[in-house]
Amino acid sequence: MRTSIVAPLGALAALVLLAGCGSASDTADTSAPAASSAPAASSTAAPATGAPSPELTAWAGQVCDETAELKDSVGGIATAVATGGTDIAASLAGQAATITSAASTLVATVQAVPADGSSPEATAVKDSAAATQASVDALGASINELTSASGIGVVTALAGVGSAAKDAVSAVGETVQVIGSAISGGGGKLGEAFAANPQCAALQQ
């Protein structure tokens, strides 16, 4: 009778020991989770402005050349009127068509600014060129009046040419100033394109 009771107790003890070993093994095998690495900080570089295109640089040089030509022509008329002379009307006779054509050419060139030069500075150049054309056209009309005047009308017409010449000189000067502002005021690619042409810097002198 005693033997039959001891055998089940021994088996029960064996089971308890096995359960204890399994629990310890499970605890020992549990590992701490690996530390997660922090995401790398992303750096966003500022986009480069880039150099002006060859087309824009060539356009800027042409604008400065045409502005310089118009500046000289209008300035020459203003000087001729201020100097006077007995044959002033005849000396100015061919100038009206020359200056109005030059102003029209300048406006057409300015309007054709390449795409990478589109900016507030380009708009300012366009506006000043349009104002210059209006003033030069008025000067051309006054010269035509002078060449067709006679008698006392010559004096009045000459005074009109003098006044219109001053206005035209001022208008061309405004275009020159706008170009200078684009060069010195950080006008982006347009300013760089003007600065790349020596004639644009010479225009400011």
Image (cartoon, rainbow, N blue to C red):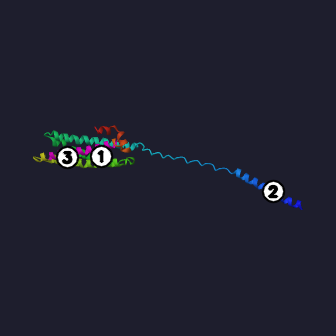
| Marks 2/3: CA–CA distance | 123 Å
Q: Amino acid at mark 2?
A: Ala
Image x and y of residue 190, in percent: 36, 44
| x 88%, y 61%: residue | 4
Residue 23 visible (yes or no): yes
Q: Which residues are magenta?
A: 157-183
Res 108 seen here: no
Q: Earlier in the sequence, mark 2 or mark 3?
A: 2
Eye-nearest disc, 2 or 3 = 2
Quarter occupied by the C terminus: top left
Q: What residue sits right under mark 2 in the picture?
A: 13
Q: Which residue is mark 3?
A: 164
Contact between labelled residues 3 and 2, with CB atoms less than 8 Å apart: no
Quadrant of residue 179 within the rendered picture: top left
- The answer to whether residue 118 is magenta is no
The residue identified by callout 1 is 106
